[in-house]
Image (cartoon, helix red, strand yellow):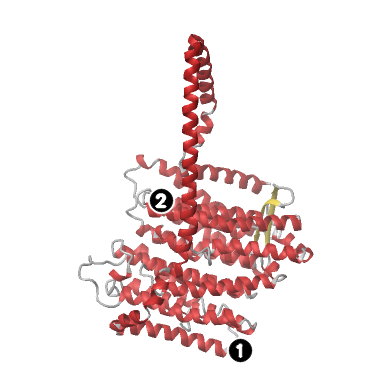
Amino acid sequence: MVDPTNPLASYALQATLLLPFLGMTVLFFGGRLRSSMQEAPKRWPGLVAVFFVACSLILSTVAAAGTRNHHTIAMQGGDWIPGFGPAFSFQLDWLSSWILMLVGVVSLMVMIFSLGYMREERDQHRYFGELLFFTAMMKLLITAGSYLLLFAGWESVGLASYLLIGYHFERPKAAQAATKAFIVNRVGDAGLILGIIAIALSCGSTTFTAVASAAMSIPHGTLQLICAMLIIGAVGKSAQFPLHIWLPDAMEGPTPVSALIHSATMVCAGVYLLARSNFLFLLAPEVGMGAAVLGAVTAVFAASVALVEDDIKRVLAYSTISQIGFMFIALGIGADRAAMYHVVTHAFFKSLLFLGAGSVIHAMHGEQSLKRMGGLRKELPVTFWTMCIASLSLAGLPGLSGFFSKELILEAGFESGHLFVTACGIVTTLLTALYSWRLMSLAFFGEPPSHRLAPHEAPVSMRIPLVVLSVCCVVVGWGFVPIRWSAWGIMISSGVLACSGLALAWYYYIRRPDARASLDERFAPVASLLRNRWFIDAVFEEHLVEGVVLRTAAGAAVADAALIDGAVRGTASVARSAAAGLGWSDRFVIDAIVRAVADITRFLSWPSRALQSGFVQTYALLFLVGVLAALGYCFSR
């Protein structure tokens, strides 16, 4: 399965997909031997993961070089379900090559950062193995050449996120957060499944090239339905309103995991799906406009909630939801290149912010509340300056990468006449600048609490990714995308609002913190609304979660009562039969037959019982072996 027009890029693409799988296999099998390797350094799983991710990134660059001059690398092989096209279809073009390299860079930075951050954790082989699995599945999703294979990567990314969010499974909150993320994403996945089935029935294939060729012949009503189903899938994976509720709770996972999920992997998968399906939305612009309005509402809503959050990671979580809303705005109005450019810039400054937050949490001995921080800029100078660059880029300060990508989206909205989503984007710019500098003010300025333990700067392995990503936040904005100077009004207004938000945050949180108290009293109802997250989470908990749990518990109680009643009646019947004179035949014949059947069943079922161990790691390993076998078979053809 090689593209004859560029075999080198094809082999590089195959290798970059297989290397994370290979690294994961080494870690999972090596972890079994850890008891006999007591003298080995604790960092060996992290070093193995860094090596495989770095090699995969180099090969990704080689593969991406083959897409120059608008060339597309295509590989197909194997048959699966009739009417769905080839089982394995890979496609690498300008869109997937940029995101492939982005995932590689951010994953490498997260792996290096984790060397220091997770140094004292147990089961590091499991942590780094799951990170490699996450990276591998995201690369599979990106390079898929069909909706069917994309869905395989889509679901596998969901599984990987479940494992990583619940890494500390012994903590009830982490286990609940992982379960919540998994269940909420299934709602969006149901829409995506229906959309893929509709595509297969309408086009006779799910490969992107075949669907693009047949798109004009799809009835408009069916096309609208397909686009709507794809949006539902994207809303779930990218945590847009109202399926955003899983992402803030996902902060229970290790902070480097949050950096990877929020910047270049899971939450961007929905954006990538819509960008990849752009040829369908061009034929149904009214459905795409619905995605833009949804993104605009989500952007304002999430930014307003971030204004009052006190957990440093939750502030960044709602920031991600808001920034993904910007991307939905761009995709809905047809500015897919602007959306993907914002994906790139957002990946750099958001991963830097999360890793910087991890450095702060590491220095504060696990503390995440902004109320218990303050005055950290002197103790953590590298963390402070790098997070300062990331925060200003997030705020859209002119000259940094975030300003350029946001400006392209706002310009596209203004020039196309979509004033509502443009206005929402401008308002979000003000709110973003306000909450981003509020975070910096509470964490790094002011007076430190008197009872606080002495913080310390992060080790070198954690500082290197911060510096590298901060450089990316500065240089990525220059020379990559031409700014059209035809919308001076939008550019000036968004820049002024960004600076105004920064100034307001500086005044109320650094210059006059006493004035903030009177402001909170004056707008107490608004503050209460925001602190309760517009009561959306409460509605979900009360009317969905608790209702389902109560109904399930009631049903289980009825079932248990019926079962007990049946058991009692059955026992009484058996007792009467025995008393009636079954005698020795019941004891020595019937019981012997029953025991023989049980023993035979137990003997024949031992292979399946060995596989059904109940350990997620065993299931993941078996899944890996199957995937490697299937990929090896297809690549060898």
x and y percentages locating residue 624 in the rendered image: 54, 45
x and y percentages locating residue 123 in the rendered image: 38, 48
Quick check: 155 left or right of 287? left
Which residue is at the front of the view, 295 or 391? 295
Residue 610 can be seen, yes or no: yes
In space, the residues marked 1 and 2 are separated at their CA atoms by 52 Å
Where is mark 2, residue-wise?
45
Mark 2, secondary structure of its residue: helix
Residue 491 vs 604, above or below: the answer is: below
Which residue is at the front of the view, 501 or 108? 501
Tally of numbered discs: 2
Give the residue displayed 28% in from the left and 73% down from the top: 374
Amino acid identity at mark 1: Ser
Mark closest to the chain's N terminus, 1 or 2 = 2
Which residue extends farthest top?
A: 584
Which residue is at the front of the view, 440 or 637? 440
Amino acid identity at mark 2: Pro
Quick check: 283 left or right of 15? right
x and y percentages locating residue 463 in the rendered image: 36, 67
Residue density around tag 2, few if under 14, some if 14–19, many if 20 or more, within 10 Å: many
Q: Kindly indicate whether the residue at mark 2 contacts the one at mark 1 (C-beta within 8 angstroms).
A: no
Between marks 1 and 2 in the image, the one whose residue lies nearer the viewer: 1
Residue 371 vs 250, above or below: the answer is: below
Give the residue displayed 41% in from the left and 44% down from the top: 31
Give the residue displayed 31% in from the left and 75% down from the top: 444
Which residue extends farthest left?
A: 450
Residue 11 can be seen, yes or no: no
Mark 1, secondary structure of its residue: loop
Where is mark 1, residue-wise?
486
x and y percentages locating residue 145 in the rendered image: 66, 58
Quick check: 381 left or right of 428? left
